[in-house]
Image (cartoon, grey):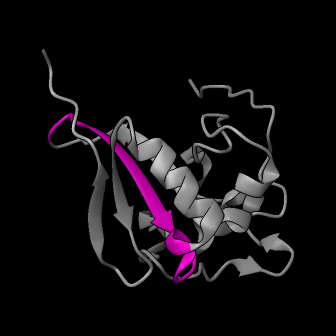
Amino acid sequence: MHEVRHFKRSCGECTACCTVLAVDELRKPMRWACEHLACSGCRIYDARPKGCRDFDCLWLRGEIAGDESRRPDRLGVIFDSFRDAATNDSRFVAFEVWTGAFAEPAAAALLAELSATREVQLSSRDGSWRMIGCSRVAP
């Protein structure tokens, strides 16, 4: 049974995930624009694969506070959280939409705020990864 999701936010014109995330069903590698992406959005939206249908960034889910200035295509960062399938560890990841986005004032301030209470894995546009923030240690 397909889970019905209710969000107060919508993607609107944002297609950041189409240019950053890998889509196995389409053989689309990470950090490459999808071949189905057009100026008007996704050309196969109604028939898009499960990997695309199932992804909702944290901004869309309402888990990133703030207005549309924090939408991924405007902020330059896509946030996601999930459990690692191999380790069952919780992961909080920030994907850079364009080179240098992590250093821009709005994104840097949000990253500092979020990393004050958790580890944030940064996936830079150049393919490098690094960790910021504190590690929570169980008492």
Magenta-tinted stretch: 87-103
Residue shown at 34% from the left, 38% from the top: 118
Q: Nearer the viewer, residue 79 or 103?
A: 103
Answer with left or right where residue 127 lies relative to residue 63: left
Find residue 136 and report its image quarter.
top left
Find residue 126 and report its image quarter.
bottom left
Residue shown at 70% from the left, 53% from the top: 70
- Magenta residue check for 95: yes
Give the percent coordinates (x, y) of residue 94: 45, 57
Seen in the picture, residue 138 relative to 8 is either above or below; the reply is above
Give the percent coordinates (x, y) of residue 34: 59, 78
* Total marks in image: 0
Seen in the picture, residue 45 relative to 86 is either above or below; the reply is below
- Magenta residue check for 84: no
Figure quadrant of the C terminus: top left
Give the percent coordinates (x, y) of residue 88: 20, 34
